[in-house]
Image: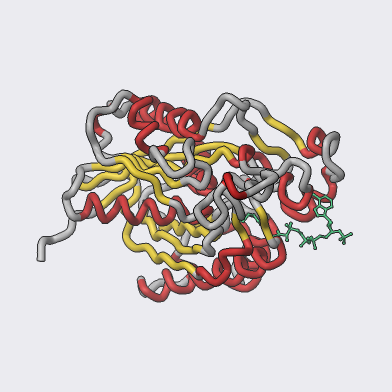
Amino acid sequence: MKKLAEVYVRAVGAYVPPRRVTNDELAQTVDTSDDWIRSHTGIGARHLADESVTTSDLAVGATKDMLKRHGIQLPEIGAIVVATSTQDYLGFPATACVVQEKLGLQVIPAFDISAGCTGFIYALEVARGLVATGTVPSVLVIGAEKLSAITDWSDRNTCVLFGDGAGCVLVQGGQGGEGEIVDSVLHAEGSGGSYLCIPQGGTSAPFDTAVPLQGHKLHMDGRAVYNFAVRVLKEVVDELLSRNHLVIEDIDWIVPHQANSRIISAAAKRLKIDQAKFFMNIEDYANTSAASIPIALREMEEQGLLKRGQRIMTIGFGAGLTYGGNLIIW
Ligand code: ACO
């Protein structure tokens, strides 16, 4: 069998829309409070995109940030994979194709991955495969979401939780970059799909039979998702440790999907580790689904928290229900 190439994360980028909405501002339009949101979720504010902005615009913003900060030229991008649940178009064209066109890139592979909040984890592993087998020299992996477009702004159970934004990494083989992706685990439990879904608009309930239009916004059973998330966060950490003959003390950072600080506290307790091992920035961005992990990586890089040789776990969980993780040696 052909020897597979080592695959690295070479560069990181992110973009969030400039409009920042605090909990207090939200409480002016929906029956909630800063105190409730902070104590139940850890969220203090979220960035929300204007109506005319699309998910691909956010993705392009993150890509430009990465290109500029790392001095990378556009032709160095060998493929584009966008992890998102909020595609520019229902079905097609893929948001990755829209991004390709907006960036002015020539013919390269471009496609979307739909794995909810775990999308970035899945996309990173798909990118690793594409590069390791030599199909393409590099892949731009983007997690991008305009969740405000699928949020029911009259439902306080969900609307306080989400934000818009995008993050990306350039994955490539060869001479070594910042972080080698050494392993991934990917899982799904389709039996829990109804806990987190958009009931209408797909082929099971097309818009033309959905009269009046309802159910086209995100629906969530918060308690069920909470229990699932706490369970699988621990399971994925344990699985990555055991597959790689490591113990938790060998891990420098766990970068979890930023869904809710209580989920992370509960998982830390179950893992019997200090919560400080988890990087968290949910206070400033809320839950940006597939974008939350690359946005977190970009912040960690900027703050000088990512050091060469460190072992980093990225852990995702979300709609599907999907979950998984990557082990990266930075
Ligand atoms: N402001 C004020 N009160 C609220 C709000 C709000 N925004 N939302 C709910 N409440 C009320 C409820 O109406 C309820 O009132 P009641 O007792 O009078 O009926 C009370 O608060 C408690 O509601 P619960 O739903 O039991 O609150 P809980 O403690 O479970 O917290 C939460 C809700 C934060 C959603 C929690 O279930 C959770 O964290 N779930 C995980 C879901 C998640 O993070 N989803 C993100 C998307 S999925 C993902 O990214 C993986």
The residue lying toward the viewer, choosing from 68 and 251, is 68
Q: Which quarter of the figure has residue 205?
A: bottom right
The image quadrant where one finds the N terminus is bottom left
Q: How many marks?
A: 0
Ligand 1 image-quadrant field? bottom right
Q: Is residue 14 left or right of residue 171?
A: right
Q: Is residue 146 above or below residue 8?
A: above
Name the colour scheme: secondary structure
Q: Is residue 173 left or right of residue 88?
A: left
Q: Is residue 80 above or below residue 130?
A: above
Whether residue 304 is visible, yes or no, is no
The residue lying toward the viewer, choosing from 75 and 319, is 319
Whether residue 138 is visible, yes or no, is yes
Q: Percent position (x, y) of residue 5?
A: 19, 54
Residue at 72% of width from left, 45% of height from top? 159
Residue at 42% of width from left, 38% of height from top? 95
Q: Percent position (x, y) of residue 112?
A: 39, 46
Residue at 62% of width from left, 73% of height from top? 270
Q: Percent position (x, y) of residue 79?
A: 28, 40
Q: Is residue 74 left or right of residue 272?
A: left
Q: Residue furthest left?
A: 1
The residue lying toward the viewer, choosing from 101 and 143, is 101
The residue lying toward the viewer, choosing from 44 and 98, is 98
Residue at 76% of width from left, 52% of height from top? 157
Q: Percent position (x, y) of residue 188?
A: 47, 67
Q: Is residue 261 above or below residue 286?
A: below
